[in-house]
């Protein structure tokens, strides 16, 4: 891993144990998957590039709008999924034909993410998770 990737992974791992809280982004107090990415961004650059609008847990699924993907593409550099590496943001589609609505930070063999009742955890990037990755992004 590069020094920059190590730094990003260390920041993300610093959030492990933070409880899951929808729309939150406070290390140690509460976050969701987007909040984790926002927190890593703040640690790297200071202010966030935009304030996210209020969002529901379905992430615009009824409208079939890839809002999360579009937001990531506005601020991060998209790369082909097979080229993803540690420190990259991974975007997941949790069900076939649903919008992509889960994010994590690649750590090498796994990824850090805020996940439902589990809070922020590091999970192995197992085959079921790997199948769900639809995009990968590099911090600028």
Image: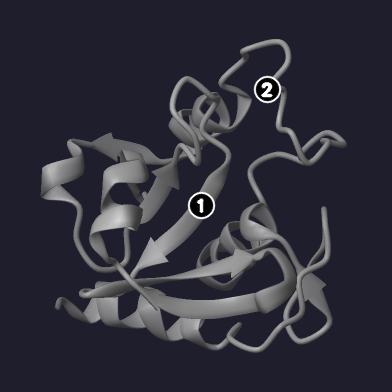
Taking the image as shown, residue 2 lies to the left or right of residue 30, namely: left
Query: Where in the figure is residue 86, as x and y percent of width and height?
Result: 24, 68
Query: In the image, what residue occupies the spot 78% across and 41% down?
Result: 57
Q: CA distance from mark 2 to mark 1?
A: 15 Å
Quarter assignment of residue 28 = bottom right
Local SS, label 1: strand
Query: In the image, what residue occupies the spot 41% across and 41% down?
Result: 76
Give the quadrant of the N terminus: bottom left
Query: In the image, what residue occupies the spot 70% across and 39% down?
Result: 50
Local SS, label 2: loop
Taking the image as shown, residue 92 lies to the left or right of residue 116, namely: left
131 w.r.t. 30: above or below: above
Mark 2 crowdedness (10 Å alpha carbons): few <14, some 14-19, many ≥20: some
> Which residue is tagged 1?
103
39 w.r.t. 53: above or below: below
Front position in the image: 62 or 72: 62
Query: In the image, what residue occupies the spot 62% across and 67% down?
Result: 114
> Which residue is tagged 2?
61
**Circles 2 and 1 in contact, beta carbons < 8 Å:** no
Front position in the image: 75 or 111: 111
Query: Where in the figure is residue 6, as x and y percent of width and height?
Result: 28, 82
Q: Tag 1 or tag 2, which sits nearer the N-term? A: 2
Front position among marks 2 and 1: 2
Query: Where in the figure is residue 116, as x and y percent of width and height?
Result: 70, 64
Query: Where in the figure is residue 133, as x and y percent of width and height?
Result: 33, 43
19 w.r.t. 50: above or below: below
47 w.r.t. 134: above or below: below
């Amino acid at each position: 891993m590069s020094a920059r990737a190590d730094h990003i992974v260390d920041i993300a791992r610093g959030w492990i144990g933070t409880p899951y809280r929808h729309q939150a982004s406070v290390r140690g107090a509460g976050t969701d998957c987007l909040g984790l990415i926002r927190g890593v961004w703040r640690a790297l650059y200071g202010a966030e590039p935009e304030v996210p609008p209020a969002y529901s847990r379905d992430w615009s699924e009824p409208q079939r709008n890839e809002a999360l993907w579009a937001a990531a593409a506005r601020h991060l550099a998209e790369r082909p999924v097979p080229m993803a590496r540690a420190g990259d943001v991974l975007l997941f589609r949790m069900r076939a034909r649903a919008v992509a609505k889960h994010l994590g930070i690649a750590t090498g063999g796994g990824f850090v993410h805020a996940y439902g009742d589990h809070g922020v955890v590091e999970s192995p990037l197992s085959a079921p998770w790997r199948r769900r990755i639809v995009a990968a992004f590099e911090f600028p």
